Amino acid sequence: MSPMQPTAHTLRLVLGDQLDPEHPWFDVRDPGVVYVLMEVRQETDYVLHHAQKILAIFAAMRAFAAQLRAAGHRVRYVAIDDASNRQSIPANLAALMAHYGAQRLQYQDPDEWRLDQQLRQWGATQAFATEAVDSAHFYTRRGELAEFFRGRPQWLMEHFYRHMRKRHQILLVADGTPEGGQWNYDHDNRQPWPGDPPPPPDARPVHDHSALWATIQAAGVDSFGQPQADVLRWPLHRAEALACLDRFIADGLPYFGRYEDAMSTRSPRLFHSQLSFALNTKMLRPQEVVQRALSAYDAGTAPLAAVEGFVRQILGWREYVRGIYWAHMPDYAARNALGHDTPLPAWFWTGDTHMRCLHHAIGQSLQDAYAHHIQRLMVIGNFALLAGLDPAAVHRWYLGVYIDAFEWVELPNTVGMSQFADGGLLATKPYVSSAAYIDRMSDYCQGCRYDRKQKTGARACPYNALYWDFFARHQDTLGRNRRLDMVYRQLGKLPAAQLQALRTHAQHLRGRLDTL
C-alpha cells in the first residue's frame, strides 16, 4: 500500500457472490468511495471446496474489479498472494479503513449466516460507522417467508409459490387463475430422455486461467475435484452470463420441462440451463431470467409446462429455500431428525464405486463441479439418506463440490429436501427410491455390476435392500406420515423372512460402504 494513496471517506465491501454491476451502488462515481474485493483463506478454507469453484469465483471477482475500474470507480483488490493480505475479511477491512482514513464502511447484506454474523459483530466493536445495505437481488426480504408461514406447522413451498405468482402477476389470466388452468405442471415434466432430441451444444465460454490456478496452488489453498484451469467453462462476468441465458432460452428451455428429471451418461446437463452459478454470484438477476422465460412462452417458442417448471425453480423454490435458511439458522445446520451418523464413503471424493449411477453422478460432480438437481437429489442424496450418512457431512460435501453451492441455497436443499434431517419442515416425505426410479429415469443401470431387479445377494442393487431397511428402521418416526401409507402397507405385506433377509443384507451393505 502506497503512503501517497489518496484518502477516502467510505469503503464498500463487495463479496465474491455479489458481482452485480447494476447494483445501485454503481450508479454514481464518487472519488471518495473505494470498492474493496478480497481473496482470503477465510473463504477458501471454511469448507473444502472444488477447485473450479475457487478458481471461477476468484476469476469472476478479478473481472468484476476490472469492470468497476473501467467504469471510473476506485477499487482496492486484495489478491490471495498479496503480502499485505491478512487472509481474513475483518482483519483486511480494519487495515484498509486505517490506510484510507475512511469514516464509514458499507457492505451488502451477506447471504450466508456466518458472514452476516461476523460482519455485524465485528462492525459493532469498531470506532467507525458500519452500514449494511440490501443486495437488491431477490424477490423477497430475508424474513418474508417466516412472516408468510407464521403459525403454520409445515411450510409448504407450493403455498408460497402460488402466493408469489399472484403477487407478481406471473402466468396468470385476467381473472387471477393460473395460465392453462393449473398451478403446477410437474406431472408433465417427468419423462426419461430417449436420446432424441439431441441436447444443445455447450455454448458456455472457455477460459484459460492456468496462471491464476498456479497462484492459488502456490498460496497453499486446499481443494478437490478437477480444476480444468485451461478450459474453465463458466461465465465470469455479466455479458457472458447474458449470452448463456440467451442460448438456454433459445435451445434448452423448449425441452427443459419434459426432461428436467431425466439423467443420462450421454449428456451431463441435457436441457438444464446451468445458470445457477451466474445467478448465485448475482451476475444475473432472477427477475430478468424469469422474464426471459415468460417472453419465450408469449412468443410461442417454449411450452407452458417447461416455462412454468423453470419459473417455479426461481420464483418459488429459490426464494423459498432462502427464507427457510434465514428463518432457522444457525440451528438448522445441526438438525439430524433421523439420527444418522455414518461417515461418507471414500468414493465420495473419487467416484470409484461399482454402482454405475453414483460413479457417474459423483464422477461428473468431481470433473465439472456440476450435477443437475435430480442427480443431486435422487442419486447421490437418495443413497446418502438410505445408507444413513451423517447429514452434516453430506451438507459439507454438497457445499464444497458444486460451483453454485452457497450455504443459503445448499443447506436447506441438503438438510431438508435431500436428507430429511429437519424432520419434515421442508419436505412432506423423504425423497428416496429403490433402483426402479433410477432405471426409469436414466440409462445408469445399463452395464452396471449390480442387478437393478435383485434385492439381496452379491449382485443385488444396493438401493433395493437399503430402501426397505430405511423404512423399517424409521417406522416409529415415519410410520404416521400419510404420504407414506402405501410404502408402509407394502412393508407390512412382506413375509417376515423376506424382510429379515432385506434388513440383514442392508446391514451388511452399510457395514462396507467403501467397497460397494
Image (cartoon, helix red, strand yellow):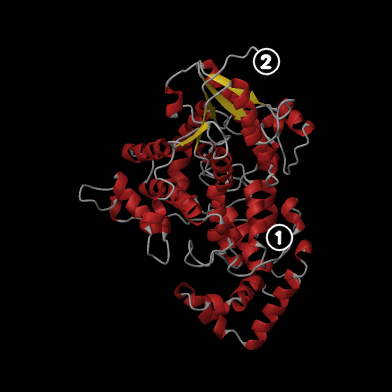
Res 185 visible:
no
Q: How many marks?
A: 2
User: As drawn, is 141 to the left or to the right of 206?
Assistant: left
Which residue occupies the extreme front position in the image?
127
Q: Which mark is residue 355?
A: 1
Name the residue: 60% across, 51% down.
Answer: 264
User: Which amino acid type is marked by label 1?
Assistant: Met
Q: How far from the left and from the top, in percent, is residue 471?
A: 59, 75
Mark 2 nearby-residue class (10 Å; few <14, some 14–19, many ≥20): few
Q: Tell me if 26 is positioned left or right of 414 in this view.
A: left
The local secondary structure at tag 1 comes to loop
Residue 157: give x, y in percent of width and height.
42, 57
| Mark sitting on residue 187 | none
Q: Mark 2 — residue? A: 2
Q: Secondary structure at mark 2?
A: loop
Upstream in the sequence, badge 2 or badge 1? 2
Residue 371, placed above or below residue 3:
below
- Farthest top residue? 4
- The reply to whether dot 2 and dot 1 touch (C-beta < 8 Å) is no
Amino acid found under the numbered disc labelled 2: Ser
Between 367 and 58, the residue placed more toward the observer is 58
Vertical order, 197 against 163 (above or below): above
| Among the 4 quarters of the image, the one containing residue 474 | bottom right
Q: Position of residue 216 (x, y in %)?
A: 74, 32
Which part of the image, by quadrant, shows the C terminus?
bottom right
Cα separation between marks 2 and 1: 58 Å
Mark 1, residues whose alpha carbon is within 10 Å: few (<14), some, or many (≥20)?
A: many
